[in-house]
Image (cartoon, rainbow, N blue to C red):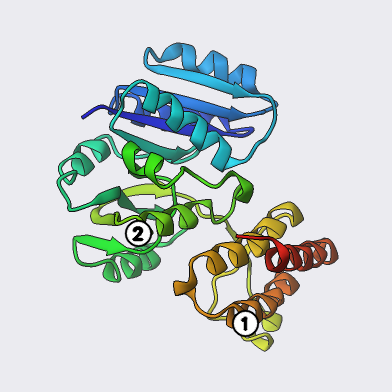
Amino acid sequence: MKIGSTIVTFNPNIIRLRQALDAVSTQVSMVRIVDNGSLNVNDIQNLIKDYANVDIKKLSRNFGIAKAQNVGFQSFKILSYDWVLTLDQDTIIPLDYVAKLNRMLHLTNAGIITGAYIDVKWNEAEVQEARANRFPKVQRVTEEISSGNLVLVQAWQEVGGFDERLFIDYVDFDFDYKLAEHGYSVYRINDVEFSHEIGAPVTKGLLSKLLLLNEHEVFDHSAFRIFYIFRNRLIVRRRHPQSGSPIRMLIREILNLREILIMRKPRFAKLRAALRGILRGVLESK
């Protein structure tokens, strides 16, 4: 089996990217960085000179993660690779990560085989809680984040790749659902872990308690990202009806607006972006 890896970059931290490359470059035949118009692309090009099996495809601007991943996968398809490991620019995998997942390639109808992420922000109690809820060792899941995924190239091609209209958020979950609809499965190997960072959690206080958000994990985002989160969540959930009725989904998004009230400023810009996202999510076709 020929295994490669694609890493999408956008203004990455070069030190963290080096750590990511140090970890993955020894485990796969080739690493292709697809850069989304980074301001520090010259630093990336200088960095990869230290690696014999790492190259870069530079895009003229930020086309989003879906477009960049499709570019990477297409290049591996042309080279007749069987599997591609998708990584974020700051995701560091253990040195035996690919070898352990490689032992699971026999799993029935596997479209994705992935490990279990451990968020770098979690304390020891949170790590243990996550581990306690991840069972059995080989677990079929309906959705999983894209970083750390070993993806079957044939499955990527069969489902039509990643949806470039989504740009960033929910690209991974949409792809997971499409795999299931084409008869493929997503497997998480729970004793194969890797380091990852989901986002910046919001510090909660009295207001979050009054808004009944204390039990919800809330992450802060820019207005730019919030637009895509609200828009894409509706599009993807409506596209894959196992998520529930459209009315219930719309009500859920309206309730989710509460989260913006406990985020950092500018809250009005974020609220406006969320409302635009909801409107677009309702009006746009599947």
The residue shown at (39%, 47%) is 195
Compared with 38, 194 (above or below) is below
Q: Position of residue 49 (x, y in %)?
A: 47, 11
What residue would you read off at disc 1? 247
Determine whether, in the image, residue 221 is placed left or right of residue 111. Answer: right
Q: In the rendered image, is residue 245 in sight?
A: yes
Q: Position of residue 45 (x, y in %)?
A: 56, 16
Q: CA distance from mark 2 to mark 1?
A: 24 Å
Identified by mark 1, the residue type is: Ile
Q: Position of residue 101 (x, y in %)?
A: 22, 43
Give the numbered dot on residue 180. Answer: 2
Q: Position of residue 227 (x, y in %)?
A: 72, 58
Q: In the rendered image, is residue 19 in sight?
A: no
> For residue 134, which quarter of the picture?
bottom left
Q: Secondary structure under badge 1? A: helix
Compared with 71, 57 (above or below) is above
Determine whether, in the image, residue 27 is placed left or right of residue 195. Answer: left
Identified by mark 2, the residue type is: Ala
Marks 2/1 in contact by CB < 8 Å: the verdict is no
Q: Toward the viewer: 164 or 24?
A: 164
Q: Dot 1: within a 10 Å radius of its alpha carbon, few (fewer than 14), some, or many (20 or more) residues?
A: few
The quarter of the rendered structure image containing the N terminus is: top left
Compared with 250, 226 (above or below) is above
The quarter of the rendered structure image containing the C terminus is: bottom right
- Total number of numbered discs in the rendering: 2
Q: Dot 2: within a 10 Å radius of its alpha carbon, few (fewer than 14), some, or many (20 or more) residues?
A: some
Q: Toward the viewer: 240 or 130?
A: 240
Q: Secondary structure under badge 2? A: helix
The residue shown at (27%, 70%) is 132
Q: Toward the viewer: 225 or 214?
A: 225
